[in-house]
Amino acid sequence: MDDLTRADIIKTGWGIHRVVEERLLIHPATKGTDDWLDKQRLLLADMAIHLLQTALKPGEIELDKLRNNLHAVLTISDQFLPHAGLKQATATIYDGG
C-alpha cells in the first residue's frame, strides 16, 4: 500500500474513532441493563478501530499493541458469541513473547 493511501485510511480512522468514542462515553448503559450490549457494540467498534490503526501504522507492526487489540476485540466479542470460546482464546495471545 502506498504511503498516501495508508495515511488517508489512518486519518479517516481517527475521525471515525472520535465519533464512536464520543457516543460510547455518553451512552447511559451500565452492566446488567437492557441496553448494555448496545454500549458494548460501540466499545467493540472502538477496539476494532484501534486494531485498524495498529495494522496500518507505518513500519513494523508493534506486536504488543496487536496482542492488546486482539485481546480486547475477542473479549468484547465473547458477549455476542458466547459459545465460540473467544475469551478462552485470549489465554494464548501473550504466550511466546
Image: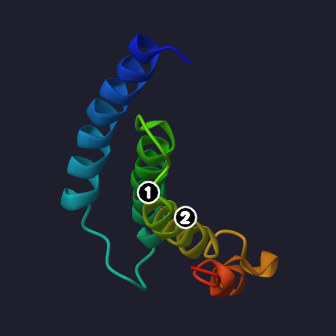
Q: Residues within 10 Å of mark 1 (few under 14, many from 20)?
A: many
- In this rendering, would 40 be left or right of 1? left
Residue at horizontal 26 percent and vertical 51 percent from the top: 21
Q: Residues within 10 Å of mark 2 (few under 14, many from 20)?
A: many
Q: Position of residue 26 (x, y in %)?
A: 19, 58
Q: Position of residue 17 (x, y in %)?
A: 31, 42
81 over 49 or under it: above or below: below
When asked about the image quadrant of residue 18, the answer is top left
Q: CA distance from mark 2 to mark 1?
A: 6 Å
85 over 6 or under it: above or below: below
95 over 65 or under it: above or below: below
Marks 2 and 1: CB-CB under 8 Å? yes
When asked about the image quadrant of residue 8, the answer is top left
Q: Which mark is residue 10?
A: none
Tally of numbered tags: 2
When asked about the image quadrant of residue 87, the answer is bottom right
Q: Nearer the viewer, residue 75 or 91?
A: 91
| Residue indicated by mark 2 | 73
| Residue indicated by mark 1 | 47
Q: What amino acid type is highlighted by mark number 2? A: Val
- In this rendering, would 79 be left or right of 24? right
Q: Position of residue 93 (x, y in %)?
A: 63, 77
- Report the quarter where the C terminus lies: bottom right
Q: In the structure shown, which secondary structural element does the residue marked by tag 1 occupy?
A: helix
Q: What amino acid type is highlighted by mark number 1? A: Met
Q: Nearer the viewer, residue 47 or 25?
A: 47
